[in-house]
Amino acid sequence: MALDFSETSLELELSCPICFYLFSEPVTLHCGHSFCLTCLEKSRDSEGCGPEVQHQCPECRVEYQDTEFPQKNFKLRNIVRSYKDTVEQTARDALRRGEVQVNTEHSEKRCSSSRLEPEREAAGGPSSESTGGTLSEEQSKCRHRLTSVMSDLQTKIALVDELMVKAKEREAAVKASNTDLRSEMKTLLEEMVEHLKHYSTAGLDLLEAELKPREKAVESMVQKVSDLHKQLKETELLANSLLEEQDDDRLNEGMQGLEVCAANLTVDPLEIGLTDVGKANTNMTNMCAEMEHRNNQLRLDLGAVQRRLRAILNPSEVTFDSETLHPSLVLSEDLKTVSFSVAKQTYPVGPKRFTSFRQALSSQSFSEGEHCWCLQAEGCSWVLGLCYGGLPRSGPGSGLESSSGAWCLMWCENLLRAYEGGRDTPLMRTPSLQKVEIRLSFSRNSVAFYSISNVSGAKTHLHTFSVSFTEPVYLAVRMMSGQPKARITLRE
């Protein structure tokens, strides 16, 4: 455990300016400076004895008589003992907790003649007697500064050791998180590639299915023309041979056969299949319709992966869940605007999709903290609020205002109502209400609604529900009237 700077400063104040250890039996001169009893006696002995001898304070050099013996400072002694006990206890507690240790040897150092002199002599250094028993004022100041610097360095080293442990823990956590993120990103991007490969393969297969019969038909036509050409050439050779025939009987017989053969060899483009000579039929209406269907499916598949990517890269962002959209609703690219669609969409059937009412839920659920959203509805009557994820997806009970697990406001026919547990509370009549702020507070167990002015931005309280939530809740919207430009936008 690292000593803080206040402890270091206190230790300096409780150290003898001669030996730089914590006071041992401290005494105080009339000038106010305190020293270890042993250190001061050695200093006085080095200056000599007698009534005429003028002693000097080792720190400020103020003179005093030999007869003026310093007073024992019992209060300072008690403070030093209390400080040493505190430091030792702190070190023992830190050792038991396994924390970073700081060398507490300085707390045990005492200034006494029985220990100080043997240590100095064993180290080969001069004793206090050989140095005249006192330190020069410059040496005293330098040693005092050095002690302060060393204590400061020890404190900083201990602090850096703690920071190093935390930094390494942080490094390990970041690397682990990044490894997971790389793995998730790689999986999703590979999934996108697979969707594209499947789309490409299916498109090529469809193209081959369209082109192969055409190629075979053309090959058959070419073969017919080739066979006809061969037969005509053979007939031509026969005719040439008959021109040289001298025998009348053989000539007449050959002519009869040649005429029959020539009559059977008709050159009819319709029969051969050459209706539009020189033009290739590239009209593939069936394939075009099939590719449009596959294009829509590809957009859905890639959109689903994109939303998962978005949730990974920006988990705090609130968006609408496309898997909950009613078929009469479409979702914008940023997943924040639900718009009415005249043509029903061919969304995949799933357990999360609403089928009876034009509703949608947020992709994210909320179970703690404080949250605030702004919803803007345009061109439609609406229901806005929160609900549990178990809200039915079809049937009369799937409407937000009908559910026991929903807290919402409805604006319809210029009347604003609050709904909780399927029960409505009329609030007020208003011809226009487009911007609504929803504040969810788990600490206060409340859901509050405010209207926001389109002109000034001023907020007006509409209604507050007091709710003890038992499970996560979702942001929920319902579009009650279907018009081409109707939409509800989430603005955080």
Image (spheres, grey):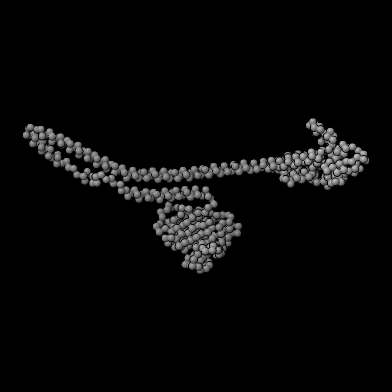
Q: How many marks?
A: 0
**Residue at the left extreme of this rendering:** 248
Residue nearest the observer in this picture, 197 or 155: 155
Is residue 35 visible in the rendered image? The answer is no
For residue 156, say whether it is visible.
Answer: yes
- The residue shown at (37%, 48%) is 291
Q: Quadrant of residue 10?
A: top right
* Residue 345 in the image, given as x and y percentages of width and height: 41, 55
Q: Quadrant of the N terminus?
A: top right
Residue 385 in the figure: left or right of residue 137: left
Q: Residue furthest right?
A: 51
What residue lies at 69% left-to-right and 42% top-to-bottom?
Answer: 156
Please name whichever residue, 383 or 317, is drawn nearer the observer in this view of the structure.
317
Please state if 11 lies on the left or on the right of 489 as rendered: right
Q: Is residue 38 above or below residue 322?
A: above
Residue 270: percent from the left, percent from the top? Answer: 21, 46
| Vertical comparison of 78 with 128: above or below | below
Task: Give the image location of residue 471, x and y in percent.
Answer: 55, 55
Q: In the rendered view, does 105 fall on the left or right side of 267?
A: right
- Location of residue 344 in the rendering, given as x and y in whole percent from the top left corner: 40, 57
